[in-house]
Amino acid sequence: MSDSVALLFGVHAHQPVGNFPAVMDEAFERCYGPYIETLARYPEFRCAFHISGWLFEWLLQRYPGTMAKLREMAQRGQVEMFGAGYSEPVLAAIPARDRLAQVRELSRMLRNWGGQAPEGAWLTERVWEATVVPSLAQADIRYVTVDDYHFLCTGRDFHELSGYFTTEEDAQRIDLFPISEQLRYRLPFAVAKDAVAYLETLAGAAQPCAVYFDDIEKFGIWPETYAWVYEKRWLEQFIEGVLGSTKIESMLFRDYHAAHATRGIVYLPTCSYREMNEWTLPAAAAQTYTQVEQLLKHQSMHERGKAFVRGGIWRNFFSLYAESNWMHKRVLSLSARLDAILGELAPAQRDTQSAQLSKLLHYAQANDAYWHGLFGGLYLPHLRRAVWNALIELEGRLDDLAPRPACALEDIDNDGHTEIVLCNRHIQIVVAGDGSGALREFDSYRLKHNFCDTLRRYEEHYHARARQGESGTNHGGDGIASAHDRVMFKHTIGEPDLVPDAAPRFALQDYVGDDARSVHYRLGESSANGVVQQAFAGAEALVKRLALKGDALHVSYRSAVPRELCMRINLALPSCDGPAGRYWLNGKCPGGFGQPLAAHGVLELTLEDDILGGCLVLSASAPFQLSAQPHHSVSQSEAGFEKIMQCVELNLRVPLSSASDFALALRVVPQ
């Protein structure tokens, strides 16, 4: 028994790959910089720091003075740097060879920078699966932090969770520190002296230890926190309270780990933090989950029963969102292909290619664009685009090393349908295997862009709160509200904004008739010359052909009977509703992508995007009627409910005759 408690205090800093430079600069000015400057004034306050690899490199280049100060603190033993996967992947969701490579890459960077490799590692979104243990151990990681909730799910009691525990997988061992949920919700939202007083109540237990490790963005980026943490001196008051207390000793994880023995063996279930487990559920199930939690609270059973009311697991996002699953399976395939190609290269060439190609793979594995919750970025087009930029560049460079067939058939996303892949040196298309004849993917290798990187409108469980309207914040006491407790609106949200899409947002989706019935195609032949698809209505009625020629996709239709065909083309462009994206029609600019557009007798339409570095030109063999509009989705972030433009929706109405084909070309024109 001890009359003091060891405080193991750590923060995790991360920005998504592909985030806007202005956002990152603001994060430094409001959070990273002030946090490091404050720590530097209190050399006796020991703490841990994790910075994801690509952010670490960006900070070194952009703010070398502040990073030099952080290095001084690390070298004098005030700060312990934690490792992780270089690009902040969810380790459980990538192959073992990539887990090992990602963790080793960040450890190498930290060793070269500060002279010491990390012993501890941060787990992205605290996603735990036992399969990550061997890779972490082989990368010389000795311990990681996970939520105390993970331990409670095994039946452990809260009062047992002091110190650290040991687990193993495939005869490989790693130690686990339980992060205190109580501290996560108190820091920095409770008054500093109250947070310190709570820590003092933990003294006196066997191996007394209080573990805090959470997002540094809570210390300046979340709403109200900059004023609270720095202007009102919360962080200084907290540190001074800890250092002035006779019952609290701030320690580094590595020092505590070296001085104390493990509390014993433990095997954790596959899970993440409680909020994440809810976010992984479909909307209806998430509502039920929330109702059960409220029932437990009403019956004063929540603290005892919360560990046994678990939601889903992180991988559920691949089942919930087809767009996430598609990216993930494409990256898995490229990882295997990269590994195979590198294995065939001569040693000198392998050394030259490996670092550059592996970095592209690691960027494509960054977690943010694969999931959705209060902090997940699946709904943010620029984060998905960063994944596709890296993925497409990597694929093009692998094609240079080992060219692929011009036509291939494969069930890429494991949905039971076989997709058709056509590619040349310039572009690639993937034709959906669900009978729609639409494009799931349309890539330009020169622009490193996927024009089909769209997101359909989903029903989300928080839409019920959006329909109820703004109701302020839900918290009490003298502190400030957490982002989890806020109901705010960045944009006006109406009921039409919340209606889920009945079909995926593909390109070249075809409809006929006054009731806009979708056309169901049957695959004809497919080869390097293109794809032929046939739709039947009694006798053969409609034939659709797709072929690639240079930088252009050529599509033609022939109908056995006269009919009007509607083609819906959803296209993702970087500018979305920003000022850098615009239409050109008949030599004039009728508006930007965020505005509706209608025109008759159109033969050519250009979509110009300054951020893209090029444009997409649609040209037809006969005039068509055009209507275009932006497609938005409604999501929730720490800043509130917001509408985000995902793509432009083009609707082309074309009269088909039995006498001639209607031809449409989509040509990529780099600047």
Image: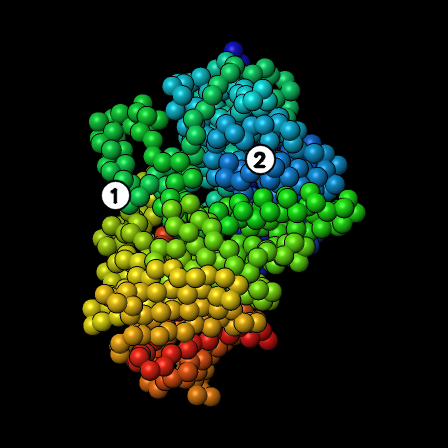
Farthest residue toward the right?
348
Q: Amino acid at mark 2?
A: Ala
Where residue 516 sits in the image (x, y, percent)?
24, 68
Q: Amino acid at mark 1?
A: Ala
For disc 1, the neighbor class at 10 Å (few under 14, some 14 to 19, many from 20) is few
Would residue 366 be seen by someone viewing this image from the given angle? Answer: no
Farthest residue toward the bottom?
587
Q: Which residue is labeled 2 in the image?
A: 96
Of the 4 image quadrants, the one containing the C terminus is bottom right
Relative side of 326 to 625, left or right: right
Residue 275, quarter of the rendered image: top left
Residue at image location 50% in from the left, 39% down from the top: 93
Front position in the image: 426 or 223? 426
Where residue 649 sits in the image (x, y, percent)?
36, 69
Query: Could you say whether the residue bearing mark 1 is in a helix, strand or loop?
Result: helix
- Mark 1 to mark 2 CA distance (whole Å): 34 Å
Residue at image location 36% in from the left, 81% down from the top: 660
Farthest residue toward the front?
539
Residue at image location 73% in from the left, 47% down from the top: 345
Would residue 314 be seen by someone viewing this image from the given angle? Answer: yes
Front position in the image: 422 or 200? 422
Rendered position, 94 above or below 432: above
Farthest residue toward the top?
1
Q: Identify the mark at residue 284; answer none if there is no mark.
A: 1
